[in-house]
Amino acid sequence: MLLPSRRSRLAMAAVFMLTAAGCGGGAPTGDIDKIQVTITPFEVIVTNTAGRALFEVKVEIMPVGPATHFTTNVPRMENGERRNLSHTLFTDRDGVPFSPRNVKVSGVMVTAKDMDGKELKVEVPWKQ
């Protein structure tokens, strides 16, 4: 039988591990085998690994809460093409440029269509 002090230590350790696992921000979700997204302090890098061209690529920076998303569009990306998108390219619906100093961000979402018209979507948590 565990002593009360040991029981409380084990309980606290379990709570700590569950909290740490839940606050990790998560892993990228969606079609991560077709679109690679890398977030750096100054840009969002999108790479097409789908094996074919992508059309109507929309990259969105999603703020925490109900604020509007900051978006930029890429009309077409060839297979293997890599785009470095500076934070200043992203604007909200009023044309205000994105600044990480003014907005708390939850993640980046990329949507695109392949040559068959199939919708591809990738969401990556913001880790900075």
Image (tube, rainbow, N blue to C red):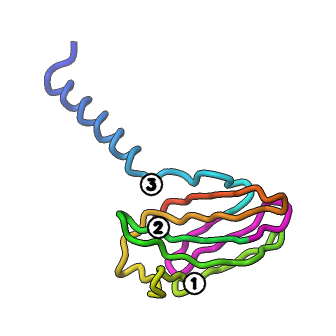
Query: Is 94 included in the stretch rendered in magenta?
Result: no
The residue drawn where x is 45% and y is 85% is 94
Report the residue marked by disc 1: 86
Query: Is 48 included in the stretch rendered in magenta?
Result: yes
The residue drawn where x is 54% and y is 74% is 40
The residue drawn where x is 41% and y is 79% is 100
Q: Please tell me whether mark 3 sits on a helix, a strand or a loop.
A: loop
In the rendered image, residue 57, in percent from the top left (x then y), is placed at 69, 71
* Quadrant that contains the N terminus: top left
Viewer-nearest of labels 2 and 3? 2
* Residue 116: mark: none
Circle nearer the N terminus (1, 2): 2
**Residue furthest out toward the left:** 4
* Quadrant that contains the C terminus: bottom left
* Residue 62: mark: 2
Cα–Cα gap, marks 2 and 3: 14 Å
Circle nearer the N terminus (1, 3): 3
- Amino acid type for the residue under numbered disc 3: Gly
Cα–Cα gap, marks 1 and 3: 22 Å
Cα–Cα gap, marks 1 and 2: 15 Å
